[in-house]
C-alpha cells in the first residue's frame, strides 16, 4: 500500500505545517469557558482534542470527513452487485480525506487479506486459555492483546528508532491489526457458538464478506449488512469512550494493539457499545414478560415505566451529544425497510421507536429521548440468524478499529504529545469557592 502511505504522508506533512502556523499566530486564543458543573459531569461540552476522521453535530449526526451516511452510501465503492459501501473505502477516506476509486478499495481489500495470513498460533492459544463462557468482548480483547507481540512500532522503539519514523511504523501496525480483526472476531464466535477453528481469509473477498464467510454466514444479504454495519459503526468523532480511550492510551506511545485493546474495554461497557446486546436482551425479556412477540404500544409503554421505576436505563435511547434520532438508526431502518419489512423483531423495534421518546421526554431530565445506533442493530442481526446477542459488541469493535486506527496514524504523523488534563479534589473546589485557593487562576 505504498500509494496510500505516500498520500497519507503528504496530507499529514501539509497539515502539520498548517497547524504550526495556526498555533504560532492564534495559539493563545480562547475557545470556550469551563463551568464548574462540567468537571463533575463527564466533561460534557468541553472541547479538548483535535481528531481528524469524523465530526459529530448534535442535530445532524455524524459526518465522516464531511460526508453524511447517505452520502457515503452513494459515493463510496461497492462490492460487485452490492448496494452498501465497502468499509475499506471509509478507512481510505478517514485516513486521507479523499474519496477512493474502485481500484483503491480493491487494492485495500487484497492488502488486508494478505496481511491477515499466518496469524501467530499463540493468539488462538491465549483465547483458548479462557473458559468458553467468558464474554465474547473479553475473548476478543485477549486475542488483540496476544497479537501485540507483532507490533513493529514497539520492536523498533525498543531498538531506538527516530521519532520521525513513528507514523510509518504505526501505519503498518494499524493496517496489520485491522486486517486480522475479522479473523480474531470469527475465532471467538466459532469457538463460543460453533466449532473452534482457525479459518484463513479468502483473498478474493472483501473485509466484510470474509468475516461473514468465516462465521458461516455465507449469504449475500448478511455480507451486505456487514458492509453497512462496519461502515456506520466505524467512528463517532474523538470524545466517545472507545475513541477517547484509544487516543489517551496511544498518547503514551502505547502501540496500535495496546491502545485499541484499551478502547475495546471501554466499548464493552453497557452505557457505550454493550448497549447493542442490552437492547435485544431487554426486548426479549419484555416479550417474555408480556407473553407476545409483538407487544402493542400500550404494553411497551407499561414495560418502559417498569424499567424506569426499577432504576434502569432504557437501552438504545439517549446520547451524550446527539439531540435527534441517530442517523445510524435511520440507515439501519432504511436497510430493514428494503430487505425485511415484515420481520416481527424489526417491527417491534419500530413500535418501540414510536413509544419510547415521548415517555423519556416526559421525565424532563433526559437530554435526548431519541434512539441511538444500538436501538436497531440487533434486530437486523437476528433476522439473519445471529441470535447470540452477547456477541454483538464484538462487531461494533471490529468496525470501530477503522476510525480509531486512522486517528492514531494522524496523532503520530502530527506528533501529538502525551495527554494529561488537570484534575482537582472537591476540597480544592470548596477552598476556591471560599476564595482560599487559586488553582484555576
Ligand atoms: N433511559 C433512562 N434514563 C436515561 C436514559 C435512558 N435511555 N438516557 C439518559 N437517562 C438519564 C440518565 O441516566 C440521567 O439520569 P440521572 O440524572 O438520574 O443520573 C439523566 O437521564 C440525564 O442524562 P443525559 O444527560 O440525558 O445523558 P448522559 O449524557 O448522561 O448519558 C447515555 C448518555 C447514552 C449514557 C444515556 O442516554 C444512556 O444511559 N442511554 C442508555 C444506554 C445506551 O443506549 N447507550 C448507548 C449509547 C450509544 N453508544 O453506542 O455508545
Ligand atoms: C459512539 O458511537 O461512540 C456512541 O454513539 C457514543 C458517543 O458518541 O458518545
Image: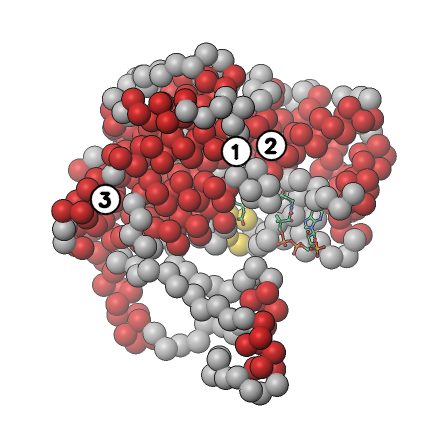
Residue 154: numbered disc: 3
Q: Are marks 3 and 2 in contact (CB under 8 Å)?
A: no
Residue at position x 47%, y 33% from top?
A: 138
Eye-nearest disc, 3 or 1: 3
Sequence-first disc among 3 and 1: 3
Report the Cα–Cα distance between label 3 and label 1.
Answer: 28 Å
Above or below, 380 relative to 411:
above
Mark 1, residue position? 393
Sequence-first disc among 3 and 2: 3
Residue 351 spot, x, y in % from top left: 75, 32
Residue 277: numbered disc: 2
**Is 200 left, or right, of 308 in this rendering?**
left
Q: Is residue 71 visible?
A: no
The secondary element bearing badge 1 is classed as: helix
Residue 297: numbered disc: none
Sequence-first disc among 1 and 2: 2
Residue 323 spot, x, y in % from top left: 63, 53
**Is 158 left, or right, of 375 in this rendering?**
left
Choose top left, top right, bottom left or bottom right for residue 411. bottom left
Q: Is residue 255 visible?
A: yes
Residue 367 spot, x, y in % from top left: 68, 55
Amino acid at each position: 500500500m505504498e500509494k496510500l502511505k505516500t498520500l497519507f504522508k503528504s496530507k499529514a506533512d501539509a497539515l502539520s505545517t498548517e497547524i504550526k502556523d495556526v498555533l504560532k499566530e492564534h495559539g493563545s486564543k480562547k475557545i470556550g469557558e469551563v463551568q464548574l458543573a462540567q468537571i463533575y459531569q463527564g466533561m460534557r461540552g468541553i472541547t479538548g482534542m483535535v481528531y481528524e476522521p469524523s465530526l459529530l453535530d448534535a442535530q445532524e449526526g455524524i459526518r465522516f470527513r464531511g460526508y453524511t451516511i447517505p452520502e457515503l452510501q452513494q459515493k463510496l465503492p461497492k462490492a460487485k452487485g452490492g448496494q452498501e459501501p465497502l468499509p475499506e473505502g471509509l478507512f481510505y477516506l478517514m485516513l486521507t480525506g479523499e474519496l477512493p476509486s474502485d481500484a483503491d478499495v480493491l487494492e485495500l481489500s487484497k492488502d488486508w487479506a494478505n496481511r491477515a495470513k499466518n496469524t501467530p498460533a499463540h493468539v488462538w492459544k491465549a483465547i483458548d486459555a479462557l473458559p468458553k463462557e467468558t464474554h465474547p468482548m473479553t475473548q476478543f480483547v485477549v486475542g488483540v492483546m496476544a497479537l501485540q507481540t507483532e507490533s513493529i512500532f514497539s520492536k523498533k522503539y525498543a531498538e531506538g528508532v527516530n521519532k520521525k519514523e513513528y507514523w510509518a511504523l504505526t501505519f503498518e501496525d494499524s493496517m496489520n491489526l485491522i486486517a486480522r480483526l475479522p479473523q480474531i472476531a470469527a475465532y471467538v464466535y466459532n469457538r463460543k457458538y460453533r466449532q473452534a477453528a482457525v479459518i484463513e481469509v479468502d483473498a478474493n473477498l472483501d473485509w466484510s464478506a470474509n468475516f461473514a464467510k468465516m462465521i458461516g454466514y455465507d449469504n449475500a444479504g448478511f455480507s451486505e449488512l456487514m458492509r453497512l454495519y462496519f461502515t456506520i459503526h466505524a467512528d463517532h468523532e474523538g470524545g466517545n469512550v472507545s475513541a477517547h480511550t484509544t487516543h489517551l492510551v496511544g498518547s503514551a506511545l502505547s502501540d496500535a494493539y495496546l491502545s485499541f485493546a484499551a478502547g475495546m474495554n471501554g466499548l464493552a461497557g453497557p452505557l457505550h457499545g454493550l448497549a447493542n446486546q442490552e437492547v435485544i436482551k431487554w426486548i426479549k425479556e419484555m416479550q417474555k414478560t408480556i407473553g407476545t412477540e409483538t407487544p402493542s404500544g400500550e404494553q411497551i409503554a407499561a414495560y418502559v415505566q417498569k424499567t424506569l421505576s426499577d432504576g434502569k436505563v432504557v437501552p438504545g435511547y439517549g446520547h451524550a451529544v446527539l439531540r435527534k434520532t441517530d442517523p445510524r438508526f435511520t440507515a439501519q431502518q432504511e436497510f430493514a425497510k428494503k430487505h425485511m419489512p415484515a420481520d416481527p423483531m424489526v417491527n417491534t423495534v419500530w413500535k418501540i421507536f414510536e413509544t419510547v421518546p415521548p415517555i423519556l421526554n416526559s421525565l424532563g431530565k433526559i437530554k435526548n429521548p431519541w434512539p441511538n445506533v444500538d436501538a436497531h442493530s440487533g434486530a437486523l442481526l437476528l433476522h439473519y440468524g445471529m441470535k447470540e446477542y452477547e456477541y454483538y459488541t464484538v462487531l461494533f469493535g471490529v468496525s470501530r478499529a477503522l476510525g480509531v486506527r486512522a486517528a492514531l496514524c494522524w496523532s503520530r504523523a502530527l506528533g501529538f504529545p502525551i495527554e494529561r488534563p488537570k484534575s482537582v479534589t472537591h476540597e480544592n473546589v470548596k477552598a476556591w469557592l471560599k476564595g482560599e485557593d487559586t488553582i484555576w487562576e
